[in-house]
Image (cartoon, coloured by chain):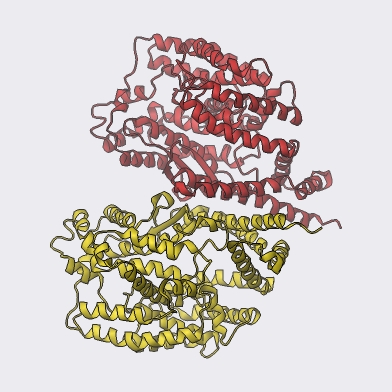
Chain colours: A red, B yellow
Amino acid sequence: MEKGFEEKLQHFQELVHKIKYYNEALSVIFWDLRTGAPKKGVPSRAKVIGMLSTESFKLSTSEEMEDCLHYFEQEENNSKLDHIYKAVVKECRKEYDRSKKIPEAMYKEYVILTSEAESIWEEAKNTDNFLMFSPYLEKIVDFNIKFIDLWGYKDNKYNTLLDYYEPGMTVEKLDRIFEQLRERIVPLVQNIKNSPYQPDDSMFFKNCFDTARQEEFSLMILDKMGYSFDAGRLDVSEHPFTIGMCPGDVRITTHYYQDNFISALFSSIHEGGHALYEQNISTELEDTPVGTASSMGIHESQSRLWENIIGRSRSFWSCYIEDLHKIFPEEFKGVSLEDFYKAINKVAPSLIRTDADEVTYNLHVMIRYEIEKALINKEIKVADLPEIWKEKMKEYLGIEPNNDREGVLQDVHWSGGSFGYFPSYTLGNIYSAQIYNAIRKQFNNLDEMIKNGELTKIKDWLGENIHKHGKLLTPAEILKSVTGEEINSGYLIDYLESKYKEIYKL
Amino acid sequence: MEKGFEEKLQHFQELVHKIKYYNEALSVIFWDLRTGAPKKGVPSRAKVIGMLSTESFKLSTSEEMEDCLHYFEQEENNSKLDHIYKAVVKECRKEYDRSKKIPEAMYKEYVILTSEAESIWEEAKNTDNFLMFSPYLEKIVDFNIKFIDLWGYKDNKYNTLLDYYEPGMTVEKLDRIFEQLRERIVPLVQNIKNSPYQPDDSMFFKNCFDTARQEEFSLMILDKMGYSFDAGRLDVSEHPFTIGMCPGDVRITTHYYQDNFISALFSSIHEGGHALYEQNISTELEDTPVGTASSMGIHESQSRLWENIIGRSRSFWSCYIEDLHKIFPEEFKGVSLEDFYKAINKVAPSLIRTDADEVTYNLHVMIRYEIEKALINKEIKVADLPEIWKEKMKEYLGIEPNNDREGVLQDVHWSGGSFGYFPSYTLGNIYSAQIYNAIRKQFNNLDEMIKNGELTKIKDWLGENIHKHGKLLTPAEILKSVTGEEINSGYLIDYLESKYKEIYKL
């Protein structure tokens, strides 16, 4: 018996909502585990996570789902859907195909492999033992290549991985982007390194920054950015993160160090940028797979925009330097706006990506991109990675690690199988500069606005032009509608050159 | 095709575990909602709770479940089960029958009614408007009577409700118990009221108790009791509660008031008593419906034992009075052990059950028991409750409320349909005195032990004799094995008389 359209739609919506509710429950559990769940409860909680994930996965790949998708993909039915549910059908189809094309046994083997690999990686990193990790990495790469063959690809195998995190992104485009970055950023870093003027940032690394007051300061800045504490909260975790359960509940974490003032502050601003995105996705998209960010790159553009372009600007600190002096009167005694501005913008080639400044950061990403692309296309071998890593570090940053711990073993991503994710960081930086340029055109007195602390005007603009659309628009569509252009790394490079030439008196 | 025993057992275990994991996920979400979840996320979270509860309910009442129960209830199969799974089959059968006997449509109507009634009750209480709430209460009572007719009952309709919270408890037994309490507690309260000696507890109600130090003190006492912080945590919520997700994760909350020192402290000890129970249920019972407390009464016996019998004893404070003076040197300057002991044991008839001391508390419960029993047996009408309440308050406690807000509207229980629950509080008090008497026989120097702070010896004894068994034993079986006796309110009455005659110099 054929169900009527309305009945079928209701059934599909229930299915879609149920998957969302499983994921929301999982998000609460993940947040709890990382912010202070009692350690003896972890084994039991892992079983709960396993069960809920399995149920959600079963629904996404169920006959019911295939039946609904088949129905709503037919033109006569599809045309009756609103624009939101048209997009939902596409997203569910993507997810369905992606999961269904991998044989269940193969996928299970991969899940076990990566969960083992993550703990092996941790030990390998701690003991600086690449050989311990490399057999796992080889298998993970092989699995990814097999998956790509099953999923299919266009032009380059790596494209399939890229597209998962950044719909529409290709090796062809990325190669051109990184080429442009390399050409102008590598010499910029060299010039900065050689400049006789070097900012002094030692003020941040004295062991005196009370964590309660650091928290107070982070909370104040988040509030000024327009982060809603009725729809979120700030907690402490080992590594800072943002987790959105629904637009009404988007939580962020940070990590305070008594001997490092800037780490927690800028990670709060960074995560705050991510959180503003998720808090302001239209509630019309709630409980659907399009009620989420357009891509990892667009997500990262929001965090970088707030952290670097706004949060490390002179205008921003011209507004908050007084609060800084109020909350830390002794610690920043005699530190002027200029001293502070230059200190937070100190650039220096370093070994660890997560500690890198905004100029060198993209070079770290470029190394990982080049390695991933070559691995997936079988142009290099896992065994050679430590050497390749060192060579690339020397070429792009002029320094090289003494060990693999600070080299090829530093990031968790590969152990979990996340190939294709790293470029999102640089795409985020590029997008952020393009978007900021568009914002500047909107407000002819932008620097004055920031100096006056009118940050919520920027938040509102981002909400209206980017956030509210969720995943209804692709990254390219968002960029086009906001800037009128395609991706263009020129804006980021111009921004970096002009900012750092002034700071370093080049 | 008949599945083999092993295969069938595995299937049944998976079903049982899955239900447990849904409940564990729900517990994390409930805890989160009450300890600081952002308020704008609540509507979405309610949908998640609805979905997870429905899934769990579906499994408990599924054909699969009936099929497994049918199989394992057959003697040839049942005899092959271990003692744990024999009990699991019984528990699942109870739950299955309880749920299946109510027509789905009727149950849904009831769920909607009680969820509406809870918010109506809140408003009715706030505005002191019994007439606003009474139509809901009438319907809830009617539903409960209908449910009892469907479930069946023995001797008295109220027995079925009692049995749900306290397996094996009956009106016959409870009537006798409350009769004994009434006979000796009502005059005791009267004598205390008339005593010329009245302790001074004003020291607790000065607006000076720093909440961070209150927390420090609660944490210290919980640690001494043997509460494991690797398997739990202490947070703040509007109303204190304990929630056990699994033995490795049993969390408690309290509520600090700057102008009330004893509220948070004794609720921490009370919840700590509940939590010790759940932390020490045998891990052999984990992930099954018998890996929980034997009954609400036994649960309450653990909290009351720690809060009142131990926590309000002279020996206990002889051990911790020094710590008290260290943490609150100014606040308790000049307060001796005797002053403190008498102040925490001040007795006075009062209107609100949750604020009542250990002597008058059971009289509050008695009023509720008598009313519930009469309502369910249609001997009184909802409309007459305000008057009945006042009369009983006057008879048992010698005071009466000026309004319904402080009278019949004070408790949340009835709005949610929890009839039969109130007696658990008094059963807990009675059990606690009986159990303590058994402990005293075990350790011939119990008071010395407590004075020396050797509380974990008591915790270990409770763990070994009560906690570890979970729901494998009924309340009566636990009492019999621990005390050799049936329930006997004499121990509680003797304890109260002897303690308060000394304090009030009667």
Q: Quadrant of residue B482?
A: bottom left
Which percent across, then down, holds residue A170?
67, 23
Q: Position of residue A389 (x, y in %)?
A: 54, 16
Instruction: State how many labels appear.
Output: 0
Residue for point 23% across, 81% down = B501
Residue B229 drawn at (x, y percent): 39, 51
Give residue A380's position: percent from left, percent from top.
Answer: 64, 15
Residue reaching furthest to the left: B334
Report the front residue among B241 and A80. Answer: B241
In this rendering, does residue B305 appear at all? Answer: yes
- Image position of B350 (left or right of B72): left
Name the outermost residue toward the bottom.
B379
Q: Quadrant of the N terminus of chain A?
A: bottom right
Image quadrant containing the C terminus of chain A: top left
Q: Is residue B474 above or below residue A18?
A: below
B320 or B387: nearer the viewer:
B320
**Given the current orientation, which residue lies at the most extreme right position?**
A1
As drawn, A266 above or below A292: above
Asked if residue A184 lies left or right of residue A58, the reply is left
Q: Is residue B382 visible?
A: no
Instruction: Give me the residue at 58% from left, 57% from top.
Output: B20
Q: Please, is residue A184 above or below residue B397 in the view?
A: above
Depth check, front residue: B264 or A384:
A384
